[in-house]
Amino acid sequence: MRTPLLVAAGIVAAGIVAVGAPMILSDYSSRILILITLNSILVLSLSLSNGFTGVFSLGHVGFIGAGAYASGILSLTVQQKAALLPHLPGLLGGLSLSFLPATVAAGVFAAVLALIIGYPLMRLSGYFVSVATMGFLIIVNVVLINASDFTRGSRTFTGVPLETTLPWVMAWLVAALLLLARLVYSPFGRSMMAARDDTIAASAVGIDVLRTRLTAFVVGAFFSGVGGSLYAHYLGSFSPITFYFAMTMNLIAMLVLGGMGSLSGALVGVVCVSILSELLRSAERGFTLGSVTVPPLFGASQIVLGILFILIMIFRPKGIMGDREFTFGAARTSASDPSNER
């Protein structure tokens, strides 16, 4: 009974934080908490394929961008579409969805896109699939820039209603954690990790490696699309460059630092990088410590994070958490430990 009670306690705690934090924290702190929660959803979606199937994708930000634009188009009012996107097809031009349906539709759109491109790409392994998924990211960026009738091209896509709040992102984070944990720590999750560790041996014992990888890829893309919608409704205005290499490197750094073989590691990586980035960004403006005055050092935060990333890779290549999970006594070992099977 420990696990259901732990899940229930986690849901209650998340609800309390979502409702109570905005009442206690400043607006700045609340925005930081929203970004941490939102990035947690994105990194968790990335960890499913990158960490548990061994398919190191560099193209998941393409699904985030696709979800952001899909949700943005669907949630604009008819009047806004007539002014900003006058050449939209009749069905899209006359359709306006509220926040939740637009977010779900964005996730489904990203999942369908992942199914189409994942079927050929998930047959690849190693750096081949990394290069191929990076190609997908570049294609998405080019399409977003050139499909100006739908996306306004390289101009800023604006007018998206600001609907993303802490309760919304916390609810989606809880849903993502519950679904991904149920998927990873199940017989299907064992298949994912078997395909990750030894593709030939997994195929030899009857595991359909392609189906396993593709399922993880599509589920991860769904939550990437959802995260893209939440991001769009948080920013209100964005452009194709928002969802490109800078975001890709940021999310991968969070995942690798936390631990690619652990859902808890994904969360730890997001929290550590986000808090450290904010502290270093504040220190960049200069500060005084006793009799010592440090002048502004703009760009120092990125340098420090880069050095930290290098040190983690040298001394702890599996990340902070490795393949361990925070179980709070509900289980003695992680699901990737063979000793779990009795």
Image (tube, helix red, strand yellow):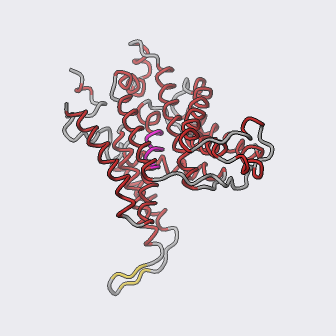
Q: Nearer the viewer, residue 27 or 142?
A: 27
> What's the residue at 34%, 81% (across, down)?
289
Name the spot of residue 224 as percent of width and height, x first: 52, 40
Q: Is residue 174 left or right of residue 224?
A: left
Q: Nearer the viewer, residue 45 or 69?
A: 69
Which contiguous range is marked in magenta? 38-46
Is the stretch drawn in magenta largely helix, strand or loop? Answer: helix
For residue 287, which quarter of the picture?
A: bottom left
Residue 42 belongs to magenta span: yes
> What's the residue at 41%, 47% (across, down)?
170
For residue 237, which quarter of the picture?
A: bottom right
Quadrant for the C terminus in the image: top left
> What's the residue at 49%, 31% (across, down)?
219
Compared with residue 128, is residue 274 higher up or lower down, i.e. above or below?
A: below
Q: Is residue 96 left or right of residue 9?
A: right
Compared with residue 56, is residue 116 higher up or lower down, i.e. above or below?
A: above
> What's the residue at 23%, 36% (across, down)?
5
